[in-house]
Image (cartoon, rainbow, N blue to C red):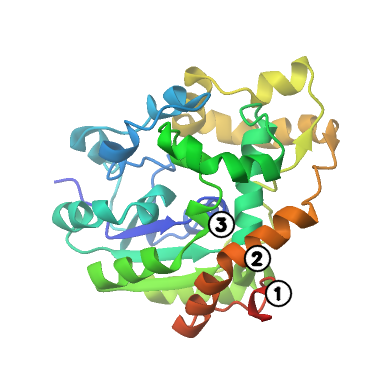
Amino acid sequence: MIKKPNFIIAGFPKCGTTSLFAYLETHPEIFIPQRKEMNFFSYPIIKNLTGGEGDKVIVGTQVSTWEQYMSYYRSVRNEKAIGDASPSYINFPACFSYIKEKLDNPKIIILLRDPIKRSYSNYLHLYRVGREKLDFNSALLEEENRIEKKYSPMWYYKRHSTYYDKVIEAQKAFRDVLLLTQEEMNKNPGGFLKQVFEFLEVDSSFVPPNLDVMYNKGGVYKKNRITNLFLKQSKTKHFLSQNVSLIKKLKPLKDKILSSFEVAPPPLDKQSEDFLIKHFKEDVKKLHKLGVNTSNWNQNYFIE
């Protein structure tokens, strides 16, 4: 009998879930599939959100059936913690009951990040792969129109950087929820992971061998045939990146090649920053009262 996941890394996109995934998969008592972002439980929602450039390509690669989902857990042996790293779940509380029904109330790890940095990182990702054509400020103003046109959630720079209500819904729905921030992971990865391991009830003294590696550092690159080959999205490329371990082994070479074409990203303009401080201010204050460590976030959220 195939064992089902008993924990989920549920949030938020561009909040360091790739790094956490990379650390957890080295723990001998943790099983987590090579494939990240299966998005099975949110698929019934996101399958209809394909209005933006490249959206249909991405949605077409998502895990859509229970049989396909469980096939990723055939290799589970005696691991204590069995995981699913799908950040999209946290943005759709409507899928929480489906998760509980299928997975028997799993533990939930929610990663947060300074919402301005998360939204801008999200923007830079789409800009980097050539999907986002607008400047950041224009993209922020266009967001509501894109939502109406059923763009995929990846385009929701503001909406998916607003956390409080979704966190509360998760705490209501699930018995065990751990709230941490990317800033905590970056500042003290060892201490951060000790908390995660204790939460998952695995050996908390384990130190991942890749603890000093930076994952998905982002960046923007000159546009040419080489960078286009590596960055332009396609259904085949996305499928391979999610399913073939060879792609992961070749990633250091890819990063080395791309680094020679790296350029400074467009700076976050003050107009956008001021707009987002005002937009996120109340949400951040409520998170702070909830106990989220906001000490390394933009402190202008707290200035009246």
Location of residue 234 with respect to 269 vertically, above or below:
above
User: What amino acid is found at the position of numbered circle 3 in the picture?
Assistant: Cys
Viewer-closest of 171 and 79: 171
First in sequence, mark 3 or 2: give its number: 3
User: What amino acid is found at the position of numbered circle 2 in the picture?
Assistant: Ile
Residue 168 lies, in percent from the top left, at 34, 71
User: What amino acid is found at the position of numbered circle 1 in the picture?
Assistant: Asn
SS class, disc 1: helix
SS class, disc 2: helix
Disc tally is 3
Tell me, yes or no, if residue 114 can be seen here: no
Q: Report the residue at 76% width, 15% height from top.
A: 225
Q: Tag 2: Cα neighbours inside 10 Å, few (<14), some, or many (≥20)?
A: some
SS class, disc 3: loop
Q: Tag 1: Cα neighbours inside 10 Å, few (<14), some, or many (≥20)?
A: few
Q: Tag 3: Cα neighbours inside 10 Å, few (<14), some, or many (≥20)?
A: many
Viewer-closest of 218 and 206: 218
The numbered mark at residue 37 is none
First in sequence, mark 3 or 1: give its number: 3
- Please identify, in this view, whether the residue under mark 3 or under mark 1 is nearer the observer: 1
First in sequence, mark 1 or 2: give its number: 2
Q: CA distance from mark 3 to mark 2?
A: 18 Å
Task: Look at the numbered discs 1 and 2 and tell me whether their residues touch, using CB distance below 8 Å.
Answer: yes
- Mark 3 = which residue? 15
> Where's the C terminus, which quadrant?
bottom right
- Mark 1 = which residue? 300
